[in-house]
Image: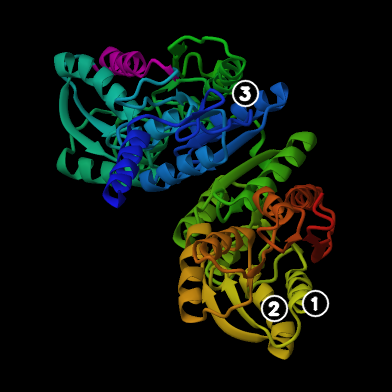
Amino acid sequence: MKKVLMLLCAIIVVMATLFRVTIDGEETSTKTVANGSIGLSISTQNNPFFVTLVEGAKKAAADKKVQLHVVDAGDDVTKQVSNIEDLVQKNVSVLIVNPVDSDAVAGAVKAAKAKGVKVISVDRAVNGVDIDCQIASDNVMGAQMATDYIVKLMGEGAKVAELQGIQGASATIDRGKGFHNVADKKLKVAASQIADFDRAKGMAVMENVLQANGDIKAVFAHNDEMALGAVEAIAGAGKKVMVVGFDATDDAVAAVKAGRMAATIAQQPALIGEKAVIQACELMAGKSIPKSMPVEVTLVTKDNVDTFNKAAEKKVEGSIGLSISTQNNPFFVTLAEGAKKAAKEKGLNLIVVDANNDVTKQVSNIEDLVQKNVKVLIVNPVDSDAVTGAVKAAMAKGVKVISVDRAVNGVKIDCQIASDNVMGAEMATDYIVKKMGEGVKVAELQGVQGASATIDRGKGFHNIADKKLKVAASQIADFDRAKGMSVMENVLQANGDIQAVFAHNDEMALGAVEAVAGAGKKVMVVGFDATDDAVAAVKAGRMAATIAQQPALIGEKAVVNAAELMAGKSIPASIPVEVTLITKENAK
């Protein structure tokens, strides 16, 4: 009898695996409950083309009154796969994806579709997956137009080079195909090198190409960032080489007008983003949409550049540069949005650059902004010490400087605008004492080492904890959710009786929540920033509290005060922005 029962159980398990369990007509094992929101997974926000694409998507989402979650992969395939998985966990109804690599994201997109998520790709295809719609420029045709223009000006048989984008990206494949459709018949291709759609790499690769092929007559770059890098390399080598790019970014259009670039292919990234959101809304309404939606491209030369030069004609004298530490953190996304809103209202040109939490990149970004002759630099440092030299150099050029959220150490800047991080951390730690009592064992998850927010929040925590609590662990998790989870798992293994944790930001706090749940423990978690995810976690009782800052207001105040500086007015050296403790009682 016992063997028969065991056999029956085994059969039931097999049958459950082969046939999905269906309740009330829904496949509970595979489908998620879509919530009417849209997820946009973008390859990178450190490229003006994709920044504009996102802005077009956000505008359409605002017009349609639909929630849009934007996540930035920073040109990292692994990160993009994780981002897509996170969006699916948020139960988005439609995923809009701009792949870093058209092959590498296929698995994540298939998994999203298996959960019932509709999928639209923008600018680049997703290979090997039948998605709902692809919205993109005709990259093959655009590259053919660019190469035909090289033939027209330089003649057949001219020696040319090609700067390729990210290997595997459909834009790289299609633009390469369009180039070779013409060049292999009418030109002599002396070099074809990968430069990853990046300006600095475009410059370095072009320097090598020029050393190996000093008689190159023209270069076609798969995007304007690489083209502009090539222009710098050519100028440095003292040569005359025709450069044609692709995207018609503001910088490239200005370079065409000035004669430094010969041409570029104009896409309409804002329209691509806008169409993607509009079609996502159609899908959510149960309507059918076309499988492919092409967006027109145009060759931009010196003859017609004025048509495309509206943005480039903004007075550089009125420009403000915003160097942000990372756009892969909701807090800083909101800060940048507040700054953009204020700049738009004041009619100012705001240039936003993302360091992706890389100090070296931020220093380079600041130097680029100074080269663009910005009047005011707003900087949110990755590391408060490491950016000091670049900020000093900017000030020596007459640039005014405002820091936001984090300080710049060792230099007297014009203004710092930030929440009182010390006070906020003290409020958070006092709440732990209030709820758990004195002497309890606690842990601290620290942010990026050297960042002023890390220093100040740590100071506020220890002002209270060192007197009233027992600090069993204090570990760095770099303001990152995945690292917060990993570090907290290690802390729990070493200190199984931890009763509370204070994290320097909500991303780490939410990672800690996952680790605590995975370990099957009850630990009080308090964060800092009051991001949407954290406030939802507080409401649900998964987090105990968070400190609410006002990132949009910080960004707005920075631009408003930058405008005051440009008008020759004096501003305060420090502008504090209020913080509040958010608990379950006041989370609504």
Looking at marks 3 and 2 on the same chain, the residue that comes earlier in the sequence is marked by 3
Say which residue label 2 marks.
Answer: 461
- Alpha-carbon neighbours of circle 2 within 10 Å: few (<14), some, or many (≥20)? many
> What's the CA distance linking mark 2 and mark 1?
14 Å
Say which residue label 3 marks.
Answer: 310
Given contact means CB atoms under 8 Å apart, are the residues at marks 3 and 2 in contact? no
Q: Which of 581 and 234 is in front in this view?
A: 581
Looking at marks 2 and 1 on the same chain, the residue that comes earlier in the sequence is marked by 1
Looking at marks 3 and 1 on the same chain, the residue that comes earlier in the sequence is marked by 3
Q: From this view, report whether residue 322 is shown above or below residue 30.
A: below
Question: Which one is closest to the eye, mark 3 or mark 1?
Answer: 1
Say which residue label 1 marks.
Answer: 434
Q: Which amino acid does label 3 sit on?
A: Lys
- Name the spot of residue 232 as percent of width and height, x first: 38, 42
Which of the colour schemes (rainbow, by chain, secondary structure, one colour) is used? rainbow
- Alpha-carbon neighbours of circle 3 within 10 Å: few (<14), some, or many (≥20)? few
Give the main secondary structure of the magenta stretch.
helix
Can residue 221 be seen in the rendering of this structure? no
What residue span does the magenta drawing correspond to?
134-154
- Alpha-carbon neighbours of circle 1 within 10 Å: few (<14), some, or many (≥20)? few
- Name the spot of residue 10 as percent of width and height, x first: 30, 43
Outermost residue to the bottom: 467
Residue at coordinates 82% horizontally, 49% vertically from top-left? Answer: 588
Q: Left or right of 245: which side holds 23?
A: right
- Name the spot of residue 441 as percent of width and height, x first: 63, 83
SS for dot 2: helix
Question: Which one is closest to the eye, mark 2 or mark 1?
Answer: 1
Please tell me whether residue 517 belongs to the stretch shown in magenta.
no
